[in-house]
Image (cartoon, rainbow, N blue to C red):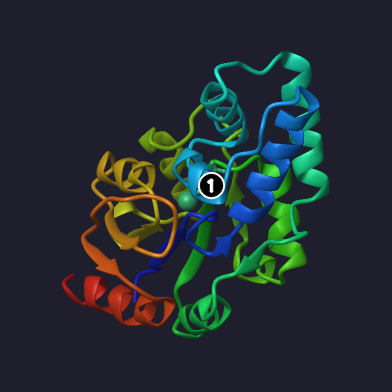
C-alpha cells in the first residue's frame, strides 16, 4: 500500500496538559497579584500556542503580559511541562496499534516545540513520532494549512494519504485548507466537527481505517 499517515495534535488530543498549562498561567498571574483562573476558564484559551494562552489569561484579568512575563512564563512552563500532564487513557495503545498496522505518525502542534518534545519523551510517546513540528518552529502555525503541509513534506506523505486528528477548530481548519480528512476528538478543549467525530481513544483505529477504506 502507499504510505499513509495519521498526523496528531498534542494538547487535548494525546495528552491532558491543561493542569500544567493552567498552573503555569496562574503562577504568572500571581506575580502581579491577579487571582487565579480555573481549569474550566483556561481550557477554551488553549489551542493557539503558549503566547496566545498567556495573552488570553491576562486579558481575562483586564491586563496584558509584558515581554518579561512572556519569557518567564515560557521557561516556567517548559520546566514543569510534565508535573501534572498525562496521556489520555487508551492513547498509547491506539498509537501502538496504528504503528503496528503500518501507518506513519506525525505531530503538528501549536505548543512550543521544545516543550512538545520534552513532554512526548517524558510520557514515552516520542517513539511514535519521527516528525514533530511545533508552533514556533516555522513561520506558520495552525490554522494555517502550511503548518500541516510542512509536517506532511517532512514525512514524504501526499495530502490525500493523510488524516489529521485534533481537538480544536484550528486542527480541522489547517486540514480543510489542504483537503486533508479529519478526525475530531471530543475529549479535548475545543469544539468543532471533523470528517468523523470520536468520543474515546478506543474509537481511533476504526475511524482511521474507515476513512482510508473509502480510497
Ligand atoms: O498549546 C496550545 O495552545 C495548543 O497545542 P496543540 O496544538 O497541541 O493543541
Ligand atoms: Mg489541541
Quadrant holding the N terminus: bottom left
> Image quarter for residue 202?
bottom left
Residue where numbered disc 1 is placed: 109
* Image mark count: 1
Residue nearer the viewer, 202 or 100: 202
Residue nearer the viewer, 116 or 157: 116
**Residue 74 image position (x, y, % from top left):** 74, 34
Residue nearer the viewer, 103 or 10: 10
**Residue 65 image position (x, y, % from top left):** 66, 18
The vertical placement of 46 against 56, above or below, is below
Residue drawn at (33%, 44%) of the image: 169
**Residue 207 image position (x, y, % from top left):** 29, 75
Residue nearer the viewer, 83 or 92: 83
The vertical placement of 132 against 6, above or below, is above
Q: Is residue 39 left or right of residue 103?
A: right
Residue drawn at (73%, 44%) of the image: 114
Amino acid at each position: 500500500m502507499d504510505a499513509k499517515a495519521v498526523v496528531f495534535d498534542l494538547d487535548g488530543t494525546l495528552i491532558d496538559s491543561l493542569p500544567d498549562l493552567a498552573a503555569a498561567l496562574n503562577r504568572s498571574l500571581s506575580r502581579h497579584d491577579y487571582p487565579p483562573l480555573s481549569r474550566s476558564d483556561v481550557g477554551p484559551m488553549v489551542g493557539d500556542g503558549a503566547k496566545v494562552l498567556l495573552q488570553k489569561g491576562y486579558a481575562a484579568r483586564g491586563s496584558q503580559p509584558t515581554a518579561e512575563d512572556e519569557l518567564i512564563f515560557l521557561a516556567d512552563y517548559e520546566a514543569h511541562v510534565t508535573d501534572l500532564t498525562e496521556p489520555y487513557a487508551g492513547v498509547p495503545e491506539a498509537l501502538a496499534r496504528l504503528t503496528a498496522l503500518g501507518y506513519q505518525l506525525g505531530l503538528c502542534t501549536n505548543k512550543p516545540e521544545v516543550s512538545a518534545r520534552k513532554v512526548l519523551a517524558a510520557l514515552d510517546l516520542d517513539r511514535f513520532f519521527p516528525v514533530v513540528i511545533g508552533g514556533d518552529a516555522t513561520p506558520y502555525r495552525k490554522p494555517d494549512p502550511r503548518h500541516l503541509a510542512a509536517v506532511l513534506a517532512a514525512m514524504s506523505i501526499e495530502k490525500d494519504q493523510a488524516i489529521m486528528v485534533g481537538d480544536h477548530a484550528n486542527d480541522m481548519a489547517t486540514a480543510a485548507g489542504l483537503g486533508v480528512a479529519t478526525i475530531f476528538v471530543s475529549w479535548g478543549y475545543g469544539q468543532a466537527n471533523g470528517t468523523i467525530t470520536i468520543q474515546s481513544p478506543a474509537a481511533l483505529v476504526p475511524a482511521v481505517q474507515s476513512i482510508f477504506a473509502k480510497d
